[in-house]
Image (cartoon, rainbow, N blue to C red):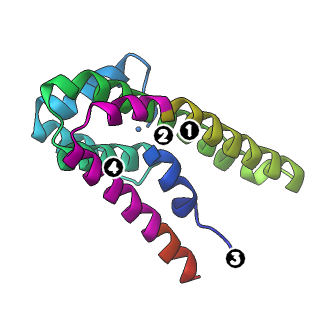
């Protein structure tokens, strides 16, 4: 059974966009709180699908559904910044692999994919503490919402896999 790019990366990006510079990431993370129109513009700014665009969309959905309060904003910003940095790093690796695909042999191709998988694992290791810090400042209702959202994402991924 083959997993698609989206079903492999969506869970990693949730629990973890052109490339963002490290100085732009905090400003983008804060924009989710400051203006709903900014969130919409960010998620619609890229003409083609990307990991970064998907991450912006997921963060925007999560932010809106959780109804992050001003007291929760610092924890949210750290989580969002980490998510966006992860997306940027992963996007770069996928672009490098795509751009080199025609000249790679099979072993090089597998090595490039192994670097992507390693990056995803490292990103998750860095993202979990940031999400845990956010999760601890959420209200019981917000936690329930987050739990359900993550379950829904996982169920969609499993559903897509079963259709293959």
Per the rendering, the mark at residue 1 is: 3
In the figure, 60 relative to 123: above or below?
Answer: below
Residue at figure coordinates x 50%, y 35% from the top left: 128
Determine contact: label 2, label 1, CB under 8 Å: yes
Residue nearest the observer in this picture, 117 or 113 = 117
In the figure, 139 relative to 34: above or below?
Answer: below
Determine contact: label 4, label 1, CB under 8 Å: no
Q: Earlier in the sequence, mark 4 or mark 1?
A: 4
Q: Is residue 105 magenta?
A: no
Residue at figure coordinates x 46%, y 63% from the top left: 154
User: Residue 2 vs residue 88: left or right?
Assistant: right
Answer few, some or many: residues within 10 Å of disc 1's Cα (few below 14, many 20 plus, some between 14 and 19): many
Answer few, some or many: residues within 10 Å of disc 2's Cα (few below 14, many 20 plus, some between 14 and 19): many
Residue nearest the observer in this picture, 92 or 9 = 9
Determine contact: label 2, label 3, CB under 8 Å: no
Q: Earlier in the sequence, mark 2 or mark 1?
A: 2
Q: Earlier in the sequence, mark 3 or mark 1?
A: 3
For the record, the magenta segment spans 129-156
SS label for mark 4: helix
The residue labelled by disc 1 is 124
The residue labelled by disc 2 is 16
SS label for mark 3: loop
SS label for mark 2: loop
Q: Where does the image place residue 9, in percent across and percent down from the top left?
A: 54, 53
Disc 4 to disc 3, C-alpha distance: 26 Å
Disc 2 to disc 1, C-alpha distance: 5 Å
The residue labelled by disc 4 is 58
Quarter holding the C terminus is: bottom right
Q: Residue furthest bottom?
A: 163
């Amino acid at each position: 059974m083959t997993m698609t790019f989206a079903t492999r990366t969506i869970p990693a990006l949730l629990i973890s966009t052109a490339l963002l510079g490290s100085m732009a990431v905090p400003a983008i993370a804060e924009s989710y709180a400051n203006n709903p129109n900014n969130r919409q513009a960010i998620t619609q700014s890229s003409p083609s699908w990307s990991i970064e665009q998907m991450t912006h969309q997921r963060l925007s959905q999560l932010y809106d559904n959780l109804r992050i309060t001003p007291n929760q904003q610092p924890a949210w910003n750290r989580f969002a910044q980490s998510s966006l940095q992860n997306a940027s790093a992963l996007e770069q690796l996928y672009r490098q692999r795509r751009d080199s695909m025609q000249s790679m042999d099979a072993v090089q191709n597998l090595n490039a994919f192994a670097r992507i998988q390693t990056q995803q694992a490292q990103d998750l290791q860095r993202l979990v503490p940031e999400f845990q810090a956010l999760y601890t400042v959420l209200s019981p209702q917000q936690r329930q919402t987050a739990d359900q959202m993550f379950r829904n994402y996982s169920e969609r991924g499993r559903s897509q896999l079963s259709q293959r």
